[in-house]
Amino acid sequence: AQSVSQHNHHVILSEAASLELGCNYSYGGTVNLFWYVQYPGQHLQLLLKYFSGDPLVKGIKGFEAEFIKSKFSFNLRKPSVQWSDTAEYFCAVKKAGNMLTFGGGTRLMVKP
Amino acid sequence: GAVVSQHPSRVICKSGTSVKIECRSLDFQATTMFWYRQFPKQSLMLMATSNEGSKATYEQGVEKDKFLINHASLTLSTLTVTSAHPEDSSFYICSAAGTDGANYGYTFGSGTRLTVV
């Protein structure tokens, strides 16, 4: 069965620190990849997505992610985090069909 | 952009009663809608997938007689939690995909927090 792993469950950073959140998946076929963010008390919002083309994807709010097919990874990065980036981040993978499989989530806390 | 409206946002019900949650796509036709459940501090777990006009497909371990899903139109899907019990208390989230899921990015509703007392 396909699985999506986010190895960092909790991350604490100071403002201006760089961020990298890991995401690995186990499915070997063609996949579409997503990162979602859930701010406290709010619903999921799409940060960025990869379907094809340039494996380095730029998203909203200064986030980017790189698809490395050989490593089955789609890590999320931001060069300088802000307090307002405190949220939970979910990686998701779509294989054939429309179903998304979510990773376990990473809770990010940014200290001012 | 694509908007999905979920209602109600919060509901408290007595044990043994049924609760209906609505999920509407406001500006696009949702051929497929997904229902998720999110436990505190955990990820989203897919409960079922519904396609307009056909029966929902439930994930393993999800009781279809307890969680009734209806997707009668291209803009509305409902989840009814029947004979609710305290263990059904959770955060339920719907997501909708249009005819081209790539463009709509699987828009999520704002969720419904169900508390069964």
Image (cartoon, rainbow, N blue to C red):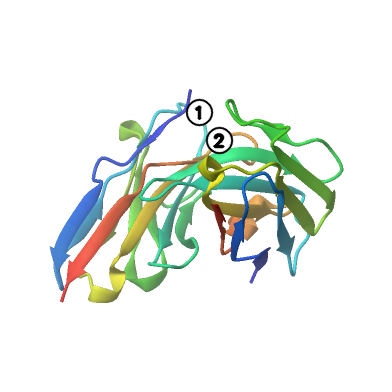
Q: Nearer the viewer, residue A38 or A27?
A: A38
Classed neighbour count for the residue bearing mark 2: other residues with Cα under 10 Å, few (<14), some (14–19), many (≥20): some
| Rendered image quadrant of residue A82 | bottom left
Question: Where is residue A51 shown, x and y percent of the image?
Answer: 52, 48
| Rendered image quadrant of residue A57 | bottom left
Question: Which element carries disc 1, helix, strand or loop?
Answer: loop
Disc 2: which residue: A95
Asked if the residue at tag 2 contacts the one at tag 1, i.e. Cβ–Cβ closer than 8 Å, the answer is: yes
Chain label for disc 2? A
Q: Residue at x 67, y 52 (%)?
A: B97
Disc 1: which residue: A29
Q: Is residue A54 above or below residue B64?
A: below
| Rendered image quadrant of residue B29 | bottom right
Question: Which element carries disc 2, helix, strand or loop?
Answer: loop
Identified by mark 2, the residue type is Lys
Residue situated furthest top in the rendering = A1
Q: Nearer the viewer, residue A106 or B14?
A: B14
Identified by mark 1, the residue type is Gly
Q: Is residue B52 above or below residue A71?
A: below
Q: Is residue B102 above or below residue B45?
A: below
Q: Which mark is residue A72?
A: none
Q: CA distance from mark 1 to mark 2?
A: 7 Å
Mark nearest the camera among 1 and 2 is 2
Question: Where is residue B23 shown, x and y percent of the image?
Answer: 70, 59
Question: Where is residue A48 shown, x and y percent of the image?
Answer: 45, 59
Q: Nearer the viewer, residue B22 or B33?
A: B22
Q: What is the number of callouts on the image?
A: 2
Q: Residue at x 25, y 59 (%)?
A: A108
Query: The N terminus of chain B lies in which quarter of the figure?
Result: bottom right
